[in-house]
Amino acid sequence: MRILVSNDDGYTAAGIEALAHALQPLGEVTVVAPETNSSGASNSLSLRRPLSVRQAANGFYYINGTPSDCVHVALHGLLDFRPDLLVSGINNGANMGDDTLYSGTVAAATEGYLFGIPSMAFSLVERDWKHLDCAVRVAHELVGRFAARPWPEPLLLNVNVPAVPYSELTGFRATRLGRRHPAEPVVRSTTPYGETVYWIGPVGCALDGGPDTDFGAIDDRAVSLTPLHLDLTDHTQAAALAGWVEA
């Protein structure tokens, strides 16, 4: 199995190094990741500047662009083969609920999915890599299961792993995305030069965090597995909208 690995924390992040090492027994691993941290980049592509591809001493390729740039360039010009699976992560922090819209980790997986490649995004729900070994083991197990039993349809899977020892996990749970309260207010401050600047505030608390959601699974110390798709159409309002524009 040929596995393409990417992330949004950058090619030197502890999460991607541990992930690539863990997947090597399962297949041929190629890493193409951003040069610097690109958290929150979502699905953005760099269209107004050239992108450079370099290779680190450990064999990882890195690009001066976004996570989507990395996967797009890898699949559409850099690699001379088509990967069997794309794995993104392991992210330093959760990607649950509404946050998936902003996540560069999920975006890298989404780009692979758009090319028709089964894709998984892995996130460790607490920062500073606490219990990274647990998330690595989960990633190894799920990718190994995919190798043994490939999913029959196009797959975009968002995986969040509780920051606990592996022995304390309560299992794996298929979930839906929860919802958050609106983010906290932006933080206003002043630079040494007297300019007013704003920092994006912290994320809000869970608004919809029932047991069938990703938030609920994590609260129960279970690994959250959320299948995603890209149809943003609100089908419930389509007929009403057609009547509205024709009235």
Image: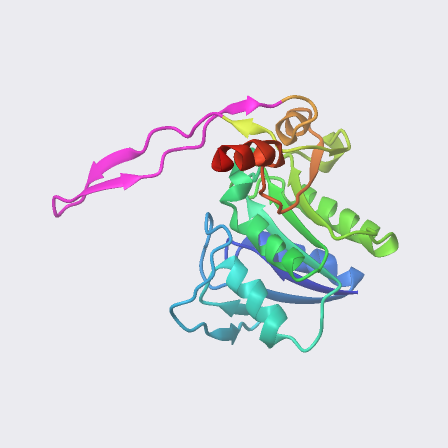
Residue 225 visible here: yes
Name the residue rendered at 81%, 52% in the picture. 146
Q: Position of residue 205 (x, y in %)?
A: 49, 24
Task: Choose between 60 and 40: the one closer to the eye.
Answer: 40
The residue lying furthest to the left in this view is 194
Q: Is residue 25 left or right of residue 119?
A: right
Q: Is residue 163 left or right of residue 38?
A: right
Name the residue rendered at 46%, 74% in the picture. 52
Check residue 196 for magenta coloring: yes
The residue lying furthest to the bottom in this view is 80
Q: Which residues are magenta?
A: 181-209
Q: Is residue 237 left or right of residue 46?
A: right
Q: Position of residue 48 (x, y in %)?
A: 38, 68
Q: Is residue 103 left or right of residue 212?
A: left
Task: Choose between 13 and 108: the one closer to the eye.
Answer: 108
Task: Choose between 85 and 194: the one closer to the eye.
Answer: 85
Name the residue rendered at 72%, 37% in the picture. 166
Pick the quarter of the image with the N terminus.
Answer: bottom right
Residue 12 visible here: no
Q: Quadrant of residue 161?
A: top right
Task: Choose between 72 and 246: the one closer to the eye.
Answer: 246
Q: From this view, report whether residue 85 is shown above or below residue 97.
A: below
Check residue 244 for magenta coloring: no
Name the residue rendered at 50%, 33% in the picture. 244
Q: Main secondary structure of the magenta part?
A: loop
Q: From this view, report whether residue 230 is shown above or below residue 94.
A: below
Q: From this view, report whether residue 16 is shown above or below residue 127.
A: below
Q: Position of residue 171 (x, y in %)?
A: 77, 32
Q: Quadrant of residue 113?
A: bottom right
The residue lying furthest to the right in this view is 148
Q: Quadrant of residue 94?
A: top right
